[in-house]
Amino acid sequence: MAKVILPICLISLLVWAGTWFMRGSSAGCADCFGLPALSTLTASMTPLSLPYPVPPEPSTWKTLPAADRLTDLEQRVQPTLKQELQKVGLKLGAPAYLRAFKESRELELWLQAADQSWQLFRSYPIAAASGQLGPKLKEGDRQVPEGFYAITPKQLNPASSYHLAMNIGYPNAYDLHHGCTGSFIMIHGSNVSIGCLAMTDPCIEEIYLIIQAALSEGQSTVPTHVFPFRMSPERLQAATKDPHHPFWKTLQPAYHIFEDKRQVPKVKIVAGEYQVR
């Protein structure tokens, strides 16, 4: 019996995954592919407990216009969010900075306090992300990008099919210079994704409100830096045989500026190379 059950389960999984792929590759997907990373199907993740009322059911949420979604967030989540920020000496509308680490599946949200120091407000587990360590090189390679990106007001999407979403700005000038292709790489809700960072619906609501408020209060862009791993000298040394090691070395200075000085690094792209200060 066991010999029969295993193939049937495998066939069912492949059929299910194929259905997601066909949905994701249709022109109707405005965010990213809908196929969950197969590596996440057996991965364990402890959900982050947040102090807000639960979001509406997806079937209800999908019927709401963008304006109604934002009104719901302002009424259901925003009052408690302001209290959460006040507890740690922060406020809604403060400048924000995002750092993602693919290896440990974490998204950090930093905010600038009144004394100009940067404080970690929350570290979120990434619910789903596909691919391997290494940059995104082409459309359809299922990779989450690595590098230095930025979110602007135009990149916020409250009408997302994935609850709420924000486009990180891939490809940037570095990616374009090196011939990398792809588009619509998002940080979004839900817990399935390919090429994007899926954060769950409750987490994306908090993230979205904070990023939206920072941009509304005058921050022109929210720096969004995606690293393969925490770039200590030891971890980078351990990756010397990886073909991406030369690229990863170009990311390390920005990582260390923030780690050592708690200053958001300023990144320029000159002649197709990152310059960090």
Image (cartoon, rainbow, N blue to C red):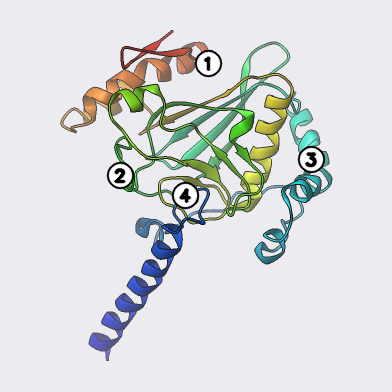
Which residue bears the numbered disc 2? 132
Residue occupied by mark 3:
78
Q: Amino acid at mark 2?
A: Gln
What residue type is disc 4 on? Cys
Q: Secondary structure at mark 4?
A: loop
Give the amino acid type for the residue marked by disc 3 in the picture.
Answer: Gln
Q: Amino acid at mark 1?
A: Val
Residue drawn at x 58%, y 53% as measured from the top left? 162
Whichever of callouts 3 and 1 sits on the residue coming sooner in the sequence is 3
- Sequence-wise, the earlier of marks 1 and 4 is 4
- The numbered mark, 2 or 4, whose residue comes first in the sequence reads 4
In the image, residue 190 above or below residue 73: below
In the picture of the structure, the residue carrying the numbered disc 4 is 32
Mark linked to residue 264: 1
Looking at the rendered image, the disc whose residue lies closer to the viewer, 1 or 4, is: 4
- Secondary element under disc 3, as helix, strand or loop, is helix
Label 4 Cα crowd, 10 Å radius (few <14 / some 14-19 / many 20+)? many
Among numbered discs 2 and 3, the one appearing first in the sequence:
3
Is residue 153 found left or right of 142 in the rendered image? right
Q: Which residue is at a point 51% across and 57% down the rendered structure image?
A: 28
Labels 2 & 4 near each other (Cβ < 8 A)? no
CA gap, disc 2 and disc 4: 17 Å
Q: Is residue 102 left or right of residue 235?
A: right
The quarter of the displayed image where residue 7 is located:
bottom left
Q: Is residue 18 left or right of residue 68?
A: left
| Gap between marks 3 and 4 measured at Cα | 27 Å
Name the spot of residue 232 as percent of width and height, x first.
34, 23
Residue occupying image coordinates x 53% and y 53%: 46
